[in-house]
Image (cartoon, rainbow, N blue to C red):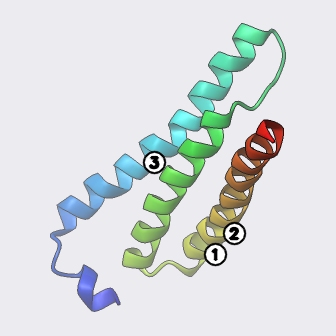
Amino acid sequence: MLAALTWIPHHLWLIFGFFGQAMFFMRFFFQWLASEKAGRSIVPNIFWIFSILGGSILLIYAIYKQDPVFIAGQSVGFLIYARNIYFIFFSKKQSAE
């Protein structure tokens, strides 16, 4: 799989990695805005959307870098983010019934 990723120039991988990090940062930004608006600490649904987007991009970048620590961390995070998104959409479906 790594051979399929090596044709991309290094500087494009850096841009991709920074983009993933920006997506990951946005989860904190929107969580902060929602908490300020509510006057208490809350986790809005958009937090999980940005978590899975940023986490997926960073996982791909970690695989490219062949960093086992980074891969392990992003893999576990991805599972948690996906599960929370499942709960969000499943609970909405259950409420509608």
Res 28 → quadrant: top right
Dot 3 or dot 1: first in sequence order is: 3
- Identify the amino acid type marked 1: Ala
Q: Residues within 10 Å of mark 2 (few under 14, many from 20)?
A: few
Res 41 → quadrant: top right
Q: Nearer the viewer, mark 3 or mark 2?
A: 2
Dot 3 and dot 2 residues touching (CB under 8 Å): no
Res 69 → quadrant: bottom right
Residue 72's disc number:
1
- Identify the amino acid type marked 2: Val
- Identify the amino acid type marked 3: Gln
Dot 3 or dot 2: first in sequence order is: 3
Q: Which residue is mark 2?
A: 76
Of 93 and 28, nearer the camera is: 93
Of 79 and 14, nearer the camera is: 79
**What residue is at 78 percent from the left and 11 percent from the top?**
38
User: Does residue 33 appear to the left or right of 90 in the view shown?
Assistant: left
Q: Which residue is mark 3?
A: 21
Label 3 – label 1 distance at C-alpha: 16 Å
User: Does residue 53 appear to the left or right of 65 in the view shown?
Assistant: right
